[in-house]
Image (cartoon, grey):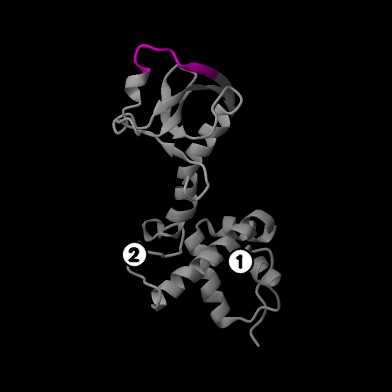
Amino acid sequence: MHAAKGHFLFICKPSSHPIQQYLTGIEPAEHRETVKRGRQRFTHRYRWLGDVPLRDGDDAMIVNWLTIEIINPAGEVTYRNSFVTDLAVDRDTVANLAAAGRARWKIENENFNTLKTKTLKTKGYNLENNFGHGKHNLSAVLATLNLPAFAFHTVCALAEDLWREAMRQQARRSRFFEHLRSITVFLVFPSWRNLLETLAFAKPPPPPP
């Protein structure tokens, strides 16, 4: 990351890093925030420690460590994770850094997993895990085309009310795409809007020519 002139914010598991030994016997700086979810209030507890070696050895990179714990109204810790970064960590930045670190799983679940077949029943993109596409195969072309299609559908979900209503009516993303493919085989729609209105059951389909 440094060679690319970038910064890093990575998960730091205590079982795989010796940083935990530097926390023994000390009390790291702490910051708490109350977050309301519905009628319940949760406590986000942050702790951090600066300038600790990432691994054993005199040549170890020096990093900043932070952790987040989410505590429910009953006082139980429902989430805990820790991170290392080369960015400055203090009371003003620790919450945003922890949120950025946790966003990795949001990207994984809401983007990558949506494209994979393990979510075939609800998503419909059918992109399998395959590390052998290469650069000269049709499968690589299809995989590449899948990405802008997903980006386009994401924009529709954010900006197009009829798209969202059509999705809601079909209940599942895969069913939406199944109906989209089927109905356009037999009918010609005068406009994109007219197609979405039909899929959203807001207007009957046009009569066949």
Asked if the magenta segment contains residue 98, the reply would be: no
How many other residues sit within 10 Å of disc 2, few (<14), some (14-19) or many (≥20)? few
Inspect this view and state whether residue 205 appears: yes
Discs 2, 1 touching: Cβ within 8 Å: no
Q: Residue at x 60, y 63 (%)?
A: 152
Of residues 114 and 16, the one drawn nearer to the viewer in this rendering: 16
Label 2: which residue? 130
Of the residues shown, which amino acid type is indicated by label 2? Asn
Position of residue 126 measured from the top left corner of the image (x, y, whole percent) = 41, 65
What's the magenta region? 23-31
Of residues 170 and 19, the one drawn nearer to the viewer in this rendering: 19
Q: Which residue is drawn at 49% across and 50% down?
A: 4
Position of residue 43 measured from the top left corner of the image (x, y, whole percent) = 52, 21
Is 204 on the left or on the right of 100, as rendered?
right
Q: Residue at x 36, y 11 (%)?
A: 25
Residue 110 numbered tag: none
Of residues 129 and 161, the one drawn nearer to the viewer in this rendering: 129
Position of residue 157 measured from the top left corner of the image (x, y, whole percent) = 62, 56
Label 1: which residue? 199
Instruction: Indicate the secondary structure of the residue bearing disc 1.
Output: helix
